[in-house]
Image (cartoon, rainbow, N blue to C red):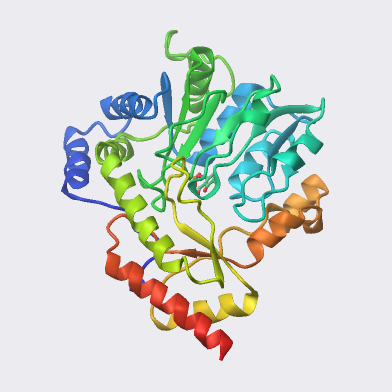
Amino acid sequence: MKKIPLFRPNINRKEFKAVENVLKSKQLSRGPCVEFFEQEFAKFVGRRFAIAVNGGTSGLDICMKALGIKKGDKVITSAYSFIASANCILYQGAKPVFCDVDSHNGLIDTNKLRQIISGKIKAFLPVDIFGQQYDLSELKKSDLPIIVDSCESFGVPPQAGALANVYGFYPNKQITTGEGGMIVTDDEQFADKLRSLRNQGFKKTKNYLTEIDIGFNFRMSDINAALGLAQLQNAKKILRKRWKLAHIYSKLLNDIPEVEFVLNMKNTNISIFNIPVICKNRHIRNCIVQEFEKHQIEYSFGFPPLTHFAYIQKATGYKPTDFPNTEIFAQNLLCLPMFTDMSTKQVRFIVKHVKQGIHNAEN
Ligand SMILES: Cc1ncc(COP(=O)(O)O)c(C=O)c1O
């Protein structure tokens, strides 16, 4: 592991104890922890129902299935995201209709969105990329269902108007269950469908073996749920700490014109996932990462735009040049480390080497 990792889950005694208790109980799955985690999570985000699943991807997948998205349908999503938000549409045989993004923050560009909304669209799947919330106002003007990919934005209250939000708990997220995800909704019927789909299509109220439709095993285990519950109990503190660290980063990087800080720190509807910055050019980014390599600082270049994947090009017919702002946003992106127990000293150390990299680039 690098001296400063890109992410690191915040695991304390409470988490060890919670998992140990489940192991001791011998009820490793379909026990009380999953239901309790769901109840507490729903309360935390302010939604009536929460449905735990074994990953953000499976959560998005069963949302598409519960909506009845099928072959030939079209769903609008962002051209800049993790592949899961396009895959969950492709799994249904449907077509993701990509929307170009704002070249400064990677969120769907609302002007471009207006140009691609048509009668053939069956649903919207906006993405809260890097913990930033996409404003749903424009989407709410239509009657189509909105499923928000909130995998990176745990901590900001979901906006009104979405049918469901899907969260992810991979260890790079604000809170983790190891692997796991959670869908939240206020719609009871939709929640029932999701519960059934994640558990082989079984309906809880009927005889256990009465299958109502084809379903899946996307259940979360009690071990993962116990970990999630322990994390959730600490969530307010975790989220505050990450904000504080992000503020230090933004202050220290503020006077460096060679890197643009992506997150708008005046916007409180952001949950800190990692610290994306846009370098002025590729040479500067290369010099910064050379410094990072030398000093064992882990980094990432974010996600490649979805149109860069050959199978997505084949399935959609899109090419990278169809989404120019997505290309601009992604080409010099650099994600800096963020983890809850990071120290101010570590942030200063990283910024020092950002500056050194820029200095090296210019000399
Ligand atoms: C934007 C986005 N969507 C979907 C996912 C998929 O979540 P998971 O890895 O839990 O399946 C992720 C996870 O990294 C993500 O960042």
> How far from the left and from the top, in percent, is residue 308?
72, 58
* Residue at 46%, 27% in the rendered image: 184
Taking 105 as reference, is 198 left or right? left
Give residue 232's quadrant in the image: top left
Give residue 22's quadrant in the image: top left
Give residue 70's quadrant in the image: top right
- Compared to residue 358, the image places residue 197 above or below, namely above
Question: In this orientation, which residue lies closer to the viewer: 71 or 95?
Answer: 95
Quarter of the N terminus within the rendering: bottom left
* Residue at 65%, 51% in the rendered image: 80
Question: In this orientation, which residue lies closer to the viewer: 322 or 284?
Answer: 284
Q: Residue furthest front?
A: 255
* Residue at 55%, 47% in the rendered image: 129
Question: In this orientation, which residue lies closer to the viewer: 269 or 9?
Answer: 269
Q: Can see residue 361?
A: yes
> How far from the left and from the top, in percent, is residue 140?
65, 24
Q: Residue furthest top?
A: 206
* Residue at 81%, 53% in the rendered image: 322
